[in-house]
């Protein structure tokens, strides 16, 4: 597809959907790289330790796929509940 500007210096930025494939994606900054592997943080539960409340999360290894427009498609481990 070639886009021609109406006036010099004016262009159109567009996203064209080419597939009906359903994917899992997150904002790119939610995917963390550590020791040459990609991870996301998954909520586990609310806890108290020494009387102080905190949220417990776990790192889940994922596989990065397509990165576009500030979002990253990820493949999660089999059996991982994405809800």
Image (tube, rainbow, N blue to C red):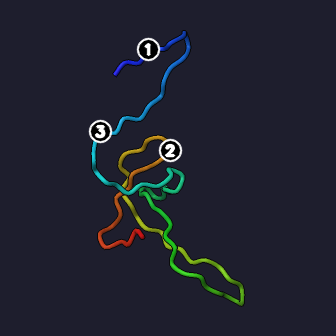
CA–CA distance between discs 3 and 1?
Answer: 22 Å
**Front position in the image: 71 or 5:** 5
Residue located beneath label 3 in the image: 18
**Front position in the image: 61 or 1:** 1
Residue 55: give x, y in percent of width and height.
Answer: 60, 77
The N terminus, quarter of image: top left
Write the residue at 42% across / 70% down.
83
Residue located beneath label 2 in the image: 70
Q: Which mark is residue 67?
A: none
Q: Are marks 1 and 2 in contact (CB under 8 Å)?
A: no
Circle 3 SS class: loop
Q: With 34 as the anchor, is 78 left or right in this view?
A: left
Circle 1 SS class: loop
Query: Which sits earlier in the primary sequence, circle 2 or circle 3?
Result: 3
Residue located beneath label 1 in the image: 4
Q: Classify 46 as above or below 18.
A: below
**Front position in the image: 5 or 28:** 5
Query: Which sits earlier in the primary sequence, circle 1 or circle 2?
Result: 1
> Could you say which quadrant of the image residue 16 lies in?
top left
């Amino acid at each position: 597809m070639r886009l021609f500007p109406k006036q010099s210096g004016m262009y159109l930025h567009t996203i064209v959907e080419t597939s009906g494939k359903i994917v899992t994606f997150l904002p790119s900054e939610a995917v963390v790289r550590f020791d040459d592997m990609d991870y996301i943080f998954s909520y586990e539960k609310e806890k108290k330790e020494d009387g102080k409340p905190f949220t417990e999360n776990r790192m889940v290894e994922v596989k990065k796929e397509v990165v576009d427009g500030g979002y990253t498609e990820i493949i999660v481990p089999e059996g991982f509940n994405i809800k």
